[in-house]
Structures are given as C-alpha cells and as structure tokens.
Amino acid sequence: MPFEHLFPSFPAERILYEDEDVIVIDKPVDVSTHAPDAGRTDDAYSRLRLALSERKGVPEGQVYLGIHQRLDRDTSGVLLFTRRKSANAGIASEFEGRHVKKTYLAVVTGFPKKLEQGVLRNELIPADGGRMQIVPSATEPADGARASRDRAKARGRANDRAPKTHPKGLLAVTRFRVLRRQDDRALLEVTPETGRTHQIRVQLAAAGGAIAGDCLYEGAPAVRLMLHASRLELRHPSNGGRLDVRAPVPPELEQWLAAPRPAVGVSDPFFLSHLRAAVDARWALGRSTETTAFRLLHGEGDGVEGIAVDVYGEHLVVHFFSSEALANKDAILDALQAFGPRGIYLKAHPKQSNNLVDPRTPDLAPATPVRGDAAADPMVVREGGLAFLVRLGDGLKTGIFLDQRDNRRRVRELAKGKRVLNLFAYTCGFTVAAASGGARETVSVDSSKGPLEWGQKNLDANGLLGTSHQMITDDALVWLKHAAKRSDRYDLILLDPPSYATTKSSRFSAADDYPALAARALALLTPGGSMLACTNHRGISTRKFRKQLHESGRLAGTTIAQLKDLPCPLDFPAAMGVEPQLKSLLVTVK
C-alpha cells in the first residue's frame, strides 16, 4: 500500500467526542453507516472499529460498537455509536423515546421567500424508484411531491394543517428556519421530530425547496447532496448529563450557497477540499493489497473540472482535459506532490476524442515524469491479485484501462470452461481475466501487433501463457467476416471498440457503426452465450446503446434474452445528471 498514509483506518480529526460509553464521529459523505454488501469494509462502522483496534493493539473482534442511528451514504455529519453494551439501554431509550434532538443543515433552491421558519407536517408513503411522496389530496395527481410543491409555492406557506388520512401514511414532522439566503438559494436549519425515510428531503421538496444535489427529488445539480447532520443532543447514558456534539459545516455547502457550480475549477479555493474528499472516497482501494492501480480523482464526477489523477503503485499519472486546468499545472502538481508520490507523469488530452494526434507527442505526454523519479519501464501493477504490465511514459495510454476493472472481474467470474473471443483486445486485459477464470480457450484480435505482444507478456506474468490462448493481428471487422464463413462459435465475446478507428481496410465510428459490428459478433455466439459490449463514446447514451444492441440482435437474426446494465467502478463516479462515459451491457442470447 504505497499511499497508505492517505487512507487511515479512520481520520482522528473526524472523531468529535469519545468516552468509555459512546463515540461520536463526523461521517464523511459517500460513506455508508454500515456495510451495504457482504465483504465491504469501507463503511463508517467497519473503519471506526478497525481504527479502535489498531489504537488498542487488539483484534477487531475485541472491539465493541453498537449502532443506534444511521445516516444515508450521501449525507455527512454527526453519527453516534456506543462503546460498550451497558450503554445501549440508555441510548436506545433516548432514541426510541424521541428525546434526541437532531439538527441538519441543508442548502436548497427556490425556497419560498415567505417561509422563514415553521413546521412541515405531512403523511409520507413509498413511491417508485426508492422515493417517498407526500400523501396527495383527492383532487391532486399521484405525484404528491411535485403537486404539493406547486401548491406551497402558490399559497406561499408550508403545509401546517393537520395531515390527511391514508391507510399506509406515516406522519412526518420537521421544523425549519432559514439561516441565510443568496439569490434563489437558502441555507436552512432543519430539525426532524419524526424519523421517516427521506423525511427532510421529500418535505423540503414538497414545500418548494428541493435540496441541491438531490436527484430523487429534482434538486439542482451539485457535487453532492447538500445535507449535513450538524448537531446531536441527548442525555448521556451514564451520568445523565446533556451531551451536545456538533460537526463543522462542510466547505461544499458554503461554496454552493455562494456560487452554485456542479464542479469547481482548479484555481477555486475549494479545490483542495474536493481533492481530499475524492481521496477519502477511495479508502477501500487505497487500503487494498491486491489492487495497486486505480483512479484517485475523476474530474467532474468528484466535483473538479478538467483533471483526473490515477495511482500506479508509488506513482501518479495526471490527466489534463482543459486549457484552464493545464494553465494551473504547477499548482495542481504541487498539491499532488504533497501526497508523497515517488514520481508524477503528465497526460494532456485533446479536447475532441476523435482528433487524430500522435499520442506520443512530448508536449502531450512526456516520456519522463514531470516531478520525481521515473517508474520502471515496464512496471507491474496488480488488480484483484492479477499482474499487469504498464508503461507510464508511453504516450497518452499506459497499457491498461482502469475503468474496466470491474468488467475484468466479471469476465473472470464468467469464463470458466468457456471459449472466449476478445475483439479490439489491445494489451489483452480481458484475455488475462478470462484465462485466470478458467477459460478453456481464448482468441484475442487486434489490428496492432505490439499490443498483442504486450498481452502475451501479461499472460506470462500471471503464469497463463500457453497454446490455448491465440493472438491474431487483424482488423476486427475483417476478421469477423472470415470467422462467420468458418462458422466459428464462442461462449463469451468481449467487445470494447474505440469510439473512432481507422485501419488500412476500414473506418469505424461507434455512433454509426456499432450495431453492424455487434451484429457480426452476436452471430458467432453459441446458444445461451453472452457478450460483454462496451462503449466510451460520449454521444451514445445508455438508452441509445441498448437500442443499438437490440438492432444488432435483429441484424444477426438472434433473439436477445437479456440486456443487463453494468455499473462503473466506484472510483469513476459520474457527475450529477450525467451518465458515465463508459457504458457496459451484458448481452445474453437464447
């Protein structure tokens, strides 16, 4: 773990209060209260437990933490745990008896000017997509949140009447007051008196002021959900005294209130806080001993415009995507140098991905690091325990696409006993994954001989090189025609073409040519076989991609049984309201 110092078990500065009975933390945004999936250890509960075990020098199993409250993953702020079982009864009595006072801060837009303070009383019922909604009146449409919001705007006050009756409705009561206004934005102090799912979010939206960054309730775009648990007041379980714990206001809330932007520029005073938040969100990757290459900062998805930063062992690779970011190169490099990398490489990408430029131009991608020492050439990084060779100074690419990490894991899980075809194979990352997963045979096709030779070295680095793994230098479009004539068949096909490509015999544009390409590949699938189809084309939405693949099935005369959307890795988050650049679908045929 070369950058282990960036990923402490739990930051000491986020522990707000601690004694023998309780410990209270300032939970970071994008961290779950407890593990959402088996095997995950990047939640607040697991990380805090690990930190306490390290501090005491005892196994984690000897550290007790009791959970009595939860904060949503996208909500930051005050979160309490008990330190010993004898404290549970007292704390439980406080929460169950509603003696605990919770105070939140929320930044909203469009909150009615006549609403300065008051009480919101509504009945809530579940809606589609994990949402909650206000119980509508008999004359209102079923979309209670939108209808109630419009009604509140019209009459200029909150719904403080007695709640309507609904057989499944749950009463939600929330007090609010406006602390500060800036144009159409407002900073609210909010105190829920009941504990319903999404209570604050749905009630503020219904009152006319959706929280910024709240996709579920039509909030304005922001880098995060602008909701923060700022204060917790309750009676101490042992001495009976009043425990009053407060968490500092996150800088993102102040920044968005002052000047709403979905992402900050690199010269913005909030740049460093966004960079630090991005690092915090990669805790599981930073602590991993099996994965040593990942994305540390993903541009607008992490609230920063124009740059991305990758970790490769002890080195960093910085990608610049805008002239503004490049103009602040030295300041960015200084900030990253403070992280302690052994060296930093630079990649300056053209504005248009279809610009034909020499990827090894020194101005775009210097062969030597711009800061620190050079990496081994090639160097070995690990991903899920597999070894991959990379070259950090070899143009704009390094030899591995980090955003395909989860897809390589999926291929590894799917490949056992199968005949696998890897088209546009590049350095054969998918081939290595398939071979390590027990594929009985692989065929890798790429128009360039060099990347395939690199792929053979990747196989060799994992002890997988052998006659069952065939490398073919050919134009994939041409090769597919010949394969169809030979009646070749494969159980699993991997299709990840570039957005634009030109060879001696063909030209390819994903926007126009993907359906025909995918149809040729689908025609080679065995009955019940699967194809992993990917595209990085920004102009192809997930909806369009699905339509393209349905068209591919029609062209191939194949019945598609399932199209399964596959999410991107957590270190490649999409900006709010924007789809991820990488779209991946697992296509299964009948």
Image: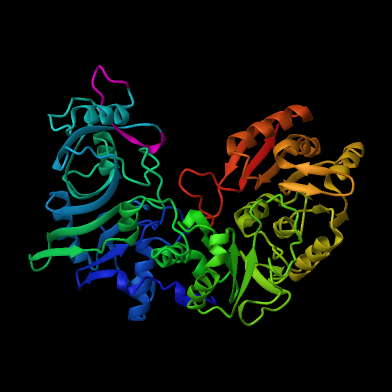
Question: At 70% from the left edge and 69% from the top edge, which residue is drawn?
Answer: 390
Res 234 seen here = yes
User: Looking at the image, which is closer to me, 155 or 124?
Assistant: 155
Q: Is residue 360 above or below residue 222?
A: below
Q: Position of residue 550 (x, y in %)?
A: 68, 30
**Residue reaching furthest left?**
240
Residue 354, image x, y percentages: 71, 49
Q: Is residue 514 left or right of residue 152?
A: right
* Residue numbers of the magenta segment: 129-141
**Split into 4 quadrants, where in the image is the N terminus?**
bottom right
Picture coordinates of residue 127, whole percent (x, y): 35, 31
Q: Is residue 450 above or below residue 9?
A: above
Residue in front for this viewpoint, 295 or 109: 109
Position of residue 83 in the picture relative to residue 225 (left or right): left
Determine if residue 236 is in view: no
Give the image location of residue 138, x and y in percent.
24, 17
**Residue at (71, 55) in percent of width and height:** 430
**The image quarter in which residue 549 lies:** top right
| Residue at x 12%, y 29% (from the top left corner) | 162
Residue 24 lies in magenta, yes or no? no
On-image quarter of the C terminus? top right
Tell me: residue 313, above or below residue 260. below
Q: How many marks?
A: 0
Q: Is residue 137 magenta-colored?
A: yes
Height in image: 25 above or below 127?
Answer: below
On the picture, is 209 further left or further right than 177? right
- Between 237 and 566, the one nearer to me in the picture: 566
Q: Quadrant of residue 376?
A: bottom right
Q: Main secondary structure of the magenta part?
A: loop
